[in-house]
Amino acid sequence: MITLALSKGRIFDETLPLLAAAGIEVLEDPDKSRKLILPTNQPGVRVVLVRATDVPTYVEYGGADMGVTGKDTLIEHGGQGLYQPLDLKIAACRMSVAVRADFDYASAVRQGSRLKVATKYTTIAREFFASKGVHVDLIKLYGSMELAPLTGLADAIVDLVSTGNTLKANHLVEVERIMDISSRLVVNQAALKLKQAAIRPIINAFSQAIERNAVPS
Ligand code: AMP
């Protein structure tokens, strides 16, 4: 049995066409079912639904053989014990620094001010500001980061940005783009060895589907 860990929402939705390319069809809609283990048309493959931040943990410890997770989540997890064969190019967005429109970020950085930065992504934020030589006090949050600069909790946030609409709606502006983010396939290293015959064809089918979808540059 191959167990694939996915999180509900964008990652689940955007993984479905890749699974279809591997001949795998999920037989239940997670929005209509309360089940956390979903069968597929292939008796040897099932999907488990877990929180996005738990996908690397499930795969690392073998609760799932494979999973799909954002580069952001992988960096924060550390990626230990995970084979990362493919950038699936799905759930694309970017990790950015944003501030209130009336906060002069450039001059704060130039003057060497100590910045208060609120984020869920403390590893990415710490490494980014260290590489710029900017001193920061990091404030760990688990959601609604946009609120932090508006309430005076922080000068800046580090968060995922897709269309930019959430920032705009909260009168925040993007001042730095830290990195592009997309989702990766992760595979448990022991499972890759022990279940090669089942896992390799799935990796290959995903890989071919990504190549077909790639926009020629
Ligand atoms: P947007 O308003 O389109 O810029 O989306 C920003 C909001 O959606 C932020 O709260 C992000 O945390 C979240 N978001 C955007 N893209 C992703 C993604 N690929 N994965 C997870 N969260 C995302």
Image (cartoon, rainbow, N blue to C red):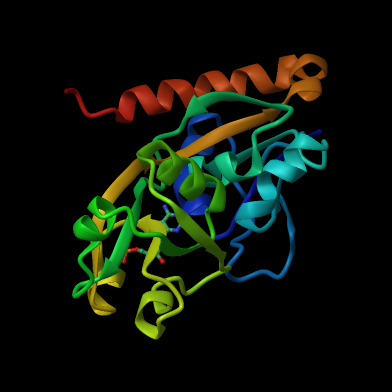
Residue 49: give x, y in percent of width and height: 68, 55
Residue projecting furthest to the front = 111
Residue ID at (54%, 37%): 19
The answer to whether residue 9 is left or right of residue 83 is left
Screen quadrant of the N terminus: top right
Depth order, front residue of 164/202: 164
The image quadrant in which ligand 1 is located: bottom left
**In the displayed structure, would residue 164 be above or below residue 151?**
above
Residue 133: give x, y in percent of width and height: 38, 41
Residue 136: give x, y in percent of width and height: 46, 56
Residue ID at (16%, 23%): 217
Depth order, front residue of 143/215: 143
The mark tally for this picture is: 0
The answer to whether residue 160 is left or right of residue 200 is left
Residue projecting furthest to the bottom = 151
The answer to whether residue 172 is left or right of residue 15 is left
- Is residue 147 visible in the rendered image? The answer is yes
Residue ID at (67%, 69%): 33
